[in-house]
Image: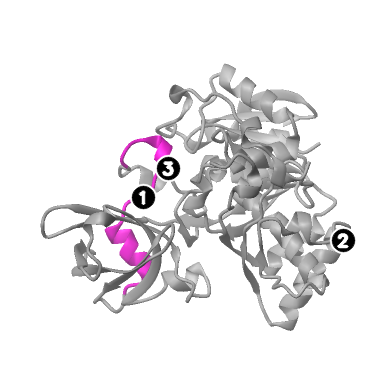
Amino acid sequence: MHPKNISIKDYTYHLPEEKIARYPLAERDISKLLVYKTGNISETIYRNIDEYLPPDSLLIFNNTKVVEARLLFQKPTGGIIEIFCLEPHEQYADITSAMLQQKKVLWKCLVGGASKWKHGQVLEKKINSGRKEIILHAAYREKKNDHFIIELSWQHGNMSFAEILHHAGAMPLPPYIKREADASDNERYQTIYAHLDGSVAAPTAGLHFTDVIFEKLKNKNARTDFVTLHVGAGTFKPVKSEIMQEHEMHAEFIDVSAGTIRNILSHLHDHIIAVGTTSLRTIESLYWMGVKCLTDSGRSATEITQWEVYDKLPQDIAVSEALQALLQQMKENDQQRWIAKTQIIIAPGYTARIVKGLVTNFHQPNSTLLLLVAALIGEGWRKVYEYALKNEFRFLSYGDGSLLWIP
């Protein structure tokens, strides 16, 4: 079956409210870890994940950093307008350059209380940066189908937009956690290796990893490397259509160094493991972008649209050939980093090209993330989720996780 014809109703399960983790455990790496391999299930804790990995493994992590994307403005009349910063306007080349803007920036946003915000009215928010008081202004510029274009401006010329968000915003916890973010979330809803500002949701599989685990991986001669995919709010977008053809997948920015691509290329015969669905989508997108470099398709290799890997691109190009083509294009363009945008949807019918395993949390019913898991391990996903529900695993972002080996 073509993934377009998948009915999301076939990928659901009952998730009781009490199974959703509202807070993280006291220690990151004592979360439970379900291990699924050749149809068999075992369990351990994340701290012992090294015992389940071959010594030749290469683990790829997403080093994006969650930004404090929720901004609350009070109107002169007392009403509250909430601005949720989704992603930068198209005028910026990528998220990093947008985050570095000074004095003003254009951003795509969701707006709570938008009906009470008159077009042209400028909102103000006072920020105490520790050095001086700064006034952040928000101006409503344009309304789109599913978001607003907001201009945010501030008078302090030495502060980047990333710094402004850090001082003025709140951590954007997922909607299913159903509580306000507190001070502890600033640390715990962030991986210990978070580096590049740009996400509005954490790459949650990585929340379990600690310095202790990284040291144990090193002692086992398992290698680690990093990619960047800036996670958008679309990761929580429910599938409301009956079949997947009618669902629009969210697009996200990726940023990968030439060194990381070479590292992946040198480990193709080993066990490459994606830590998180975002890392997996990034790695697999690299393959298809390499395929586009090799084909005279007339489409930019810096973008993967939702269905083209199923409908338009050749399926028989070797991984090594595709990645070498990508590196060659980078060399010709004098690029050290591959910055692109992917809308790839990984669903049953998809064959993983590069990864052999996935470390991931347990996902919502009727979600594209659950489809991704089903694409990798087939109907085994039901066995995994039934086991987790019956054996007191905690679900979703602050919950436990799994190591899934692809058959």
Read off the magenta span.
159-180
Give the distance between the C-alpha atoms of the residues marked 3 and 1, in whole angstroms.
10 Å
Is residue 221 placed above or below 16 in the rendered structure? below
Q: Position of residue 59 (x, y in %)?
A: 68, 49
Q: Which secondary structure lies at badge 1? A: loop
Q: Is residue 171 magenta?
A: yes
Picture coordinates of residue 279 (x, y %)? 63, 52
User: Whole-percent x and y of residue 271?
Assistant: 78, 46
- Is 99 on the left-hand or right-hand side of 36? left
Sequence-earlier tag: 3 or 2: 3
Residue under label 3 = 174
| Residue corresponding to mark 1 | 171
Disc 3 residue type?
Pro
Query: Which numbered dot is residue 317?
Result: 2
Q: Is residue 406 above or below residue 167?
A: above
- Relative to 199, does residue 358 appear above or below in the rendering? above
